[in-house]
Image (cartoon, grey):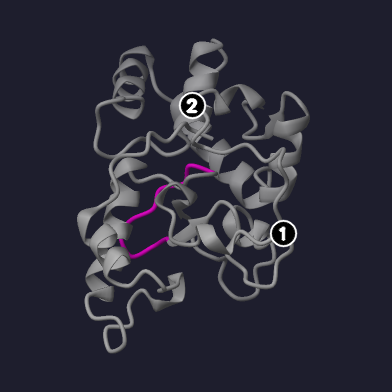
């Protein structure tokens, strides 16, 4: 999990909320009853994707404009007790998260695994030190370094077979580089100024800094 630095809420989203103070998240996109809703939703999605540099807020897989859902860190479900419904349009509670698995694949993870579950121990990507709660190995596995990290891995299924396999595949790519290629690829992958970060950014940085990757 990589720290997300929240930027200013997009103006179209803010203005739409101000115009319709009683609107709910489900009203985004309903231009008939709430004119401007589509523009507000488009602005929201673009802002989330940009501030996360093209990575899922939890697992750090690559996402793009048409391939993610807006995740509510504190669930918006109206029937949940306690209810976080007042936060459904709170920008700080919204993130870009990878999509649901295709039909027939049960190894769900991230927001679609969490659904309406929430625990105060859940690590938020907005915490500046969120990364300290997790450790990674060269086989692509993630584990918690403490209770919060362990519970977060469980709730989000961050060590799913699909995710660990994808991380391992990327690790093997780095292990196959010669020294010159490795240096160049690490620099590119971990470029903190890039508009789009390298996939599984934190995993690769963790293993690289620990001297375990090459």
Q: Which of 133 and 187 is in front in this view?
A: 133
Q: Residue at x 57, y 15 (%)?
A: 212
* The disc label shown at residue 204, or none: 2
Mark 1 or 2 closer to N-term? Answer: 1
* The disc label shown at residue 175, or none: none
Q: Secondary structure of the magenta portion, mostly?
A: loop
State the image coordinates of residue 114 (x, y, percent, origin top left): 66, 56
Specify few, some or many for label 2: CA neighbours under 10 Å numbering under 14, 14-19, or 20 or more.
many
State the image coordinates of residue 171 (x, y, percent, origin top left): 52, 31
Q: Nearer the viewer, residue 50 or 88?
A: 88
Q: Can residue 214 be seen in this view?
A: no
Above-or-below relation of 169 to 114: above
Is 66 magenta? The answer is yes
Provide the secondary structure element on which disc 2 rests: helix
Find the residue positioned furthest to the bottom. Answer: 32
State the image coordinates of residue 106 (x, y, percent, origin top left): 69, 66
Image quarter of residue 32:
bottom left
Above-or-below relation of 35 to 153: below
Q: Which of 28 and 152 is in front in this view?
A: 28
Q: Is residue 59 left or right of residue 7?
A: right
Give the alpha-carbon distance from disc 1 to disc 2, as whole Å.
Answer: 37 Å
Find the residue positioned furthest to the right. Answer: 147
Q: Which residue is drawn at 62% across and 26% down?
A: 138
State the image coordinates of residue 163 (x, y, percent, origin top left): 60, 47
For the record, the magenta segment spans 59-68
Which of the image's four quarters has the N terminus? top right
Specify few, some or many for label 1: CA neighbours under 10 Å numbering under 14, 14-19, or 20 or more.
few
* The disc label shown at residue 82, or none: 1
Q: Which of 61 and 174 is in front in this view?
A: 61
Q: In this view, does 140 lie to the left or right of 66?
A: right
Q: Do the residues labelled 1 and 2 touch (CB within 8 Å)?
A: no
């Amino acid at each position: 999990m990589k720290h997300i630095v929240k930027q200013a809420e997009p103006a179209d989203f803010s203005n739409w909320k101000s115009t319709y103070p009683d609107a709910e998240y489900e009203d985004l996109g309903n231009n008939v009853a709430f004119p401007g809703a589509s523009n507000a939703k488009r602005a929201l999605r673009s802002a989330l994707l940009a501030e996360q540099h093209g990575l899922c807020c939890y697992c750090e897989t690559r996402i793009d404009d048409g391939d993610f859902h807006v995740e509510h860190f504190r669930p918006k479900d109206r029937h949940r007790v306690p209810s976080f419904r007042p936060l459904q349009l709170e920008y700080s509670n919204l993130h870009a998260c990878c999509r649901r698995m295709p039909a027939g694949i049960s190894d769900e993870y991230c927001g679609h695994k969490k659904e309406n579950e929430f625990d105060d121990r859940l690590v938020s990507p907005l915490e500046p030190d969120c990364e300290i709660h997790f450790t990674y190995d060269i086989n692509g596995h993630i584990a918690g370094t403490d209770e919060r990290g362990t519970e977060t891995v469980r709730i989000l299924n961050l060590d799913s077979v699909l995710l660990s396999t994808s991380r391992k595949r990327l690790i093997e790519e780095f292990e196959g580089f010669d020294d010159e290629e490795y240096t160049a690829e690490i620099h590119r992958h971990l470029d903190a100024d890039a508009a789009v970060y390298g996939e599984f950014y934190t995993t690769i940085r963790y293993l690289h800094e620990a001297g375990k990757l090459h």
